[in-house]
Image (cartoon, coloured by chain):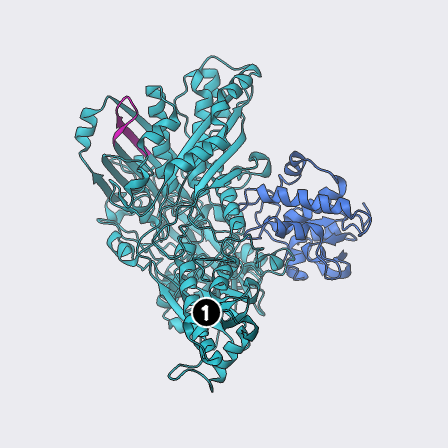
Chain colours: A blue, B cyan
Amino acid sequence: MAHTVTLTVNGTSYTRDLEPTLLLVEYLRETLALTGTHVGCDTSQCGACTVLVDGRATKACTMLAVQADGATVVTVEGLAKNGELHPIQRAFAKEHGLQCGFCTPGLMITAVDFLERNASPSDADIRHAIEGNLCRCTGYHNIVNAIRSASAEMRQTAGAQPKVAAEVKR
Amino acid sequence: MTATTNPTYIGARFARKEDPRLITGDATFTDDVMLQGMAYMTLVRSPHAHARIRRIDTAAAKKEPGVVSVLTGKELEATGMLPVFITVPGMNGSKHMPIATDKVRYAGDAVAAVVADSRAAAKRAADLIAVDYEPLPVVVDGTKALEAGAPIVHEELGSNLVFTYPVKGGDIDKAFKDAEITVTQRIVNQRLIPNAMEPRAVTAKFEAGELTLWTSTQIPHFVQLIVALNLGLGQNKVRVIAPEVGGGFGSKLQVYAEELLVGYLSKTLGRPVKWTEERREGYLATIHGRDLVENVEIAAKKDGTILGLRIRTVANVGAYLQAFAPGIPTILHAFIIPGPYKIPAFDVEVRGAYTNTTPVDAYRGAGRPEATFAMERIIDRLADEIGMDPAEVRRKNFIPPDAFPFNTISGITYDSGNYEPALDRALAMADYKGFEKRRAEAKARGNYRGIGISTYVEICGLAPSKANSALGVGWGGYESARIRVHATGSVQVFTGTSPHGQGHETSWAQIAADALGVSPNDIEVRHGDTFESPGMGVGTFGSRSLAVGGIAVHKAAEKVREKVVQIGAHLLEASPADVVVENGKVFVKGVPEKAKNFGDISMAAYLANNLPDGMEPGLEATVYYDPPNFTFPFGTHIAEVEIDGETGIVRIERYSACDDCGRQINPMIVEGQLHGGITQGIGQALYEGAVYDDNGQLLSGSMMEYHVPSAEDVPMFNLDHTVTLTNTNPLGVKGIGEAGTIGSTPAAVNAVIDALSPLGVKHIDMPLTSEKIWRAIHAAGEGRR
């Protein structure tokens, strides 16, 4: 039996009748064609599917779309605002924090949530924050550099730009 | 100015041209391709490692709503066999069909295909297929598979022996007779699961007689070739597209069953078909790596001089031979074992064995990590036995810099090398001299600290086509490039390489930019589409792309540049020798104010009404470059670890590496390749390992049981480099894709064993988990409870 589900994704509200077994990540990828969110495993280890659900980094393969009814979701496609990249996006490129790019959307989303809760993280804090997001290409070295670099930029411009995660209710 | 004498962009940390689409979600991976009317394929896979198929009942599955087609092996024989591209002498090849017909040979072997309107319907139908299996005795261990009486994986071959591959040089008997010391060590390179972050996927459509197949592959042209041959289509009617590919590491260096099946089904069903691997499915059905057991004996003098090396190896190839599998434990392993050392006598024999396990093929480094691990472990064992500093044992046996070109005892020729500077710089970075103080401090904390060195030479730039042929590789080792300058001056580079994270779009643009005198930002590099390519591409594997494909780009760009100079000279009424091409301008030396724009030249090439006499219109060049030799990157990696005395947990406290890949095109990308490679190598040393039970069930069957290193498992890496140009190619480039994986595993293991050596520990098999280390500590009568 289909359920009527309303979700706000990247600022747009969508109401759809969905099968109760549909995962949030399947809804995003296949119903809304937002294919920037990826599926890298089936045991919620890899974090490639991480999106913000009501501001918190959430593995979209661990949540049914019907469970997200009423929620506000931000995916990688919603990180840039008015054509301007989010600092985390710029930092990943600047620091060579990505190679194949498959894990990158999930890592950036995790980092966005993390940096909005910890504005001045140590490297150990960063590594702990992203240990649920696997990357096979970079060895994490430049991802740590990218998140540190983004945190510095975000501290400098704090208040000047709306927070992605804090836009929505916690 | 030319690329080789005065480069502007070669050597620059140029921002990656790939990144904008990858950081915004704009990139298209294979599973992102959504087509109208698309159906979904699911494969039914055997739960048994070895069983005869008595009967398959598909009646219930066919009645399931949404099901389009249910097919078994016999109905799918038209897809033809899966290819093997390498034949070593005396090889017993296996018949490998996309869907098993008579019996299954590993848990995960496919027995039926279901196509349905949705993934969910396909899965529901797959669950309704009843297969009557007659289980057979199982063998999972390579050594046991070669014993008399072992279950035979392929009855028609009579035994599980795939090949016996000897590589010999010098007088090995004399070496061991003259030895003042010999050391023997059994060395296991455990089976690994590659875990590219993007699971494999294939999407295909068949329209107007033409098959378009998107697939997550490192070798789109080989897929095109085999799909065309097997499905009876003209190669001109098969378009294979490797769109964004989410990592490979060798696991996508195949023509897989699913590529043939999805191509065949979309053609016969007349609608688009997609298959996307689930991760747990991939653990069974995507190739594994390594799985070598070696008995290593070294003969030496007490001053550390190596006299000879004798190695007996069993390589577990799994249930079937995959595309490159025969070449991994043989060519890419046995020949490079001597590494940077003078070895007077050498006797290696590798036997391949079929078992009831997932097939094994190339995984990052592919043979070279195994070779380096064997060599570097036995050197440390030797150093320990004779009480000599491991760094000095290595130094003593290095091939001296004045000995190049150097013919190794295994029969290959290193064109260049200079190993001591890399060792010395790595030792300095690691503060090797100050280590014993840190060991003592750790001991005071109740911990064990160790330092481990690994020096390596790898073989890259695969390969000269004639060498390929001599070694049994059934295809040339060239690479192709086409550069097209459009009338407006926009530049496109088409490459036969097929990157999946390596940043070729950036590096190739840098190479072409220096030749053409334009910015890399004005150059578009296109890859992975067989209908856009120069014709045939070989692909991306074995750290070959730059040393072969990058050189093809360089040569094509030089050809285009030559024509730009000729047209420029004609328009400027000057001698070609006086024409300068730089910063998007073409002018006579000393007269930059009278420059033609690059776009003026390209427009003239297509207007074609004012060209030098006899010149063809147009501005493009195609090159197929076949290298004259392999390349031989080298380096030294040093790991320093501290082991928690209570838990046995290893932490890598410091990691220093000095690598020499020749000229670096983009140091940022070089470092990134090393970071990732080192982490994968540390993964093998400390965390990763595929585990089968005796029934052939993969116990490490998901990311829950198989530990891919996370950010908390590895440190920041300290990198340095030396530059020893190869004269094999005009840019002096060698390759860096696998160096990190090759260097890091022995460095990490040597460090752990060094830490435990005060307890009398000589060796522990990988992965060096906290449990194994805890047991070793307690076996030595130490450790807190």
Residue beneath the point at 23% across and 41% down = B166
Residue at numbered disc 1? B483
The image shows residue B198, relative to residue B514, as above or below, that is above
- Left or right of B756? Residue A59 is right
The picture places residue B364, in percent across and down from the top left corner, at 43, 46
Residue B507's place in the image compared with A146, above or below, is: below
**Residues drawn in magenta:** B294-308
SS class, disc 1: strand
Instruction: Name the one closer to the observer, B95 or B585.
Output: B585
| Quadrant position of residue B714 | top right
The residue located at (49%, 40%) in the rendering is: B720
Query: Looking at the rendering, in which quadrant would you find the C terminus of chain B?
Result: top right
**Residue at (39%, 84%) from the top-left corner?**
B613
Residue B53 in view (yes/no): yes
Q: Nearer the viewer, residue B431 or B203?
A: B431
Which residue is nearer to you in this view: B781 or B158? Answer: B781
Is B587 inside the magenta-drawn segment?
no
Q: Quadrant of residue B377?
A: top left
Given the image, on which type of amino acid does mark 1 rest? Answer: Ile
Instruction: Specify whether A9 is left or right of B169.
Output: right
- Up/down of B368 relative to B99, above or below: above
Secondary structure mostly taken by the magenta-highlighted segment of the chain: strand
> Badge 1 local density, few (<14 within 10 Å), some, or many (20+)?
many
Residue in front for this viewpoint, A17 or A59: A59
Name the spot of residue B30 as percent of width and height, x first. Answer: 54, 60
